[in-house]
Amino acid sequence: MNLDYLWGGFAVALTTQNLLIGLVGCFLGTMIGALPAIGPINGIALLLPIAYTMGLPPESTMILLAAVYCGAEYGGRISSILLNVPGDAGAVMTALDGYPMAKQGRAGEALAISGLSSFVGGVIGTIALALFAPILSSLAIGFGPAEYFVLMIFALATLGSMVGNQPVKTLMGCVLGLMLATIGLDATSGAYRFTFGEPELGEGIEFVVLVIGLFSISEALIILENQSAGVSAIRKLGRMVARLDDLRRCVMPTLRGSAIGFVIGVLPGTGASVASAISYTTEKRVSDREGTFGKGDVRGLAAPEAANNATACGAFVPMLTLGVPGSGTTAVMLGALMLYNIQPGPLLMSEHPEMVGGLVASLFIGNVFLLALNLPLVNLFARVLTIPNWLLVPGILVLSVVGVYSTNASALSLYLMLAIGMAGWLLRKLGFDMAPIILGFVLGDVMEINMRNALAISGGDVSIFFKSWISLVLWGLAITVAVLPFMLGWRAKRIGRSADARS
Amino acid sequence: MADSTSNGRTAGRIGAAALLILALVFGLGGATIDYAFASDPLGPRVFPVVLASALAVLALLYWRSPGVAETFPRGSHLLRTLAVPSLVLLSALLLDPAGFPVSVFVLTAGVAWIFGAPPRLALLSGAGHALLWWVVFVRLLSVYLPVGWLFA
């Protein structure tokens, strides 16, 4: 297995500038993750345009964004444990046992254990990423336009079946994202599509405008609505060192959580929330003989925390090897690569080994930084929870306005951001998830170009999408992941009906 | 707050109808795209039409079972919610003529007040934000931002 890219990557990640960027990213990411409702996507969405405007090279930008991503996965646990309000979706399961531990006066122990299991999950996930990315990348080099198009179908099918509990809304989100991607000049025919005669729209909707509108503006409105009194953080952290016996009990849950998290992270479209939920329920099934899960069991805390950090690393695999994001956050990072005119996909590792290697190496270094920051500085991060919304939200809005304006100094971008933000807020109120829209938007161009190229090669014969074994395997997988949840739901209903009939 | 009652269903159905209309408009717009040359059998029209059709089918499915929607704000809550994007719009309008510090002051002081800060604290917060972000972006990060007539 060729791991040369990784050694080169360490040379990139260990430069003074990139080390500093990684450290700042880890610190900011932990703070962002600690703030309830401000997840990794929001943090990355806000920082991306600033990093781009500052003229950072692509590898440094990716290192910064990856550090923020992993930092937010670490930080999410702080508000889960101290407030019983998850910092982001991946930390929902952490609250189940973390908050009861905090109420028992063991908040410090809960933070220490979850910090350590986050570290193990992050390191195992990064090792797996370093090992598996080259294999998948070399496999993916055999992909032609037809296989690539079917891969996109697989990614969308996976997303539709695994994100949220309303697949129709998830698929609609994907289609809306794909529709937004069609706006602008069609490169093949030179036709303007949906630009309404506005020259600025000729290049399409800027990725930064979309992502900040959807995640930042709509988030501010959601925070305003959720602003409720009565939730106060647990102030007494207690001892900050984990007991040896607890650490021993956490070894297997952490390893299982890491494995589950990485595998789920690799699947396109699934995120840390799915991974931590599956890891928690698996652990409960395997270990909870005394019925202590949900009442402050350290194993119920360690497993989902390891899982959500391993997921973040797993999500980089499809992003770096296939150009298909593994999560909403990596979808934003994929968009960041496109801002630098770097085409993600199977050739990314061979064309930009320094960037891929630098990113993977920075994840190793970042996890060490995060452990070093999180254990001694947890008190400082816990203080973030006391920032009032009237100070925090205006700051988020300023970052949004500057981020969008600084990319092209255009007021139209600000109006577009606002319109997208309002539409995003309405969709969120209706129960739509924003990540599928971003995924659809990022995949839109690639999907259409590959579909049209494949049909141009075959002279319009659609059987090209079913000719190679890769396409057939991908169709099989796509159909399986699309149909499986409906089959399982139907089976559960049938079992429920027969149980009702018996009683 | 999640709302699975008839109100939630009505909101879902209004959303489904809006998305269906969007699909029709987008499909019609896609079908009438003007182009002189395309080097592939599909051209620039087919993909948008396929997407519009997919959205229309999904919107009909959504109409059939709208699922759960959140409660929409009413009365003063709605006013407060609409005031935030209005302030962002105002700050966007002010950015070029009045400059970044003024625009940020208006945005942050207004939003702080909406989020419950007392007026004096909101004004102080606005001034603090304007100064802080000016130093961070313009002085430290060298990001181009307009100064406007006040500081020109």
Image (tube, helix red, strand yellow):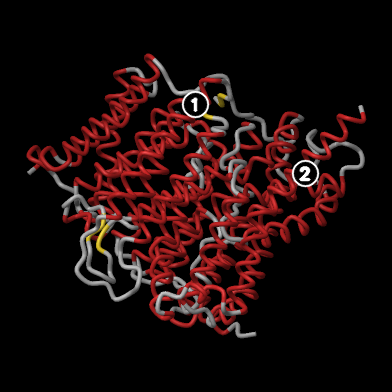
Q: Which residue is mark 2?
A: A300
In the foreground, A359 or B3 = B3
Q: Which residue is mark 1?
A: A226
In percent of width and height, residue A151 lies at 54, 68
**How many marks are shown on the rendered structure?**
2
In percent of width and height, residue B133 lies at 28, 43
Disc 2 secondary structure class: helix
Picture residue at 22% right of the left edge, 35% below the top: B91
> Quick one: quadrant of the C terminus of chain A?
top right
Q: Could you tell me if residue A368 is visible in this image?
A: no
Identify whether A314 is placed above or below B26.
Answer: below
Query: Which numbered dot is residue B57?
Result: none
In percent of width and height, residue A13 lies at 49, 71
Identify whether A112 is placed above or below A59.
Answer: above
Of tags 1 and 2, the one toward the viewer is 1
Give me the C-alpha separation between circle 1 and circle 2. Answer: 28 Å
Picture residue at 33% right of the left edge, 74% below the top: B40
- Comes first in the chain, label 1 or label 2: 1
Picture residue at 25% right of the left edge, 63% below the top: A185
> Quick one: quadrant of the N terminus of chain A?
bottom right
Q: Amino acid at mark 2?
A: Gly
Q: Where on the picture, by quarter, is residue B97?
A: top left
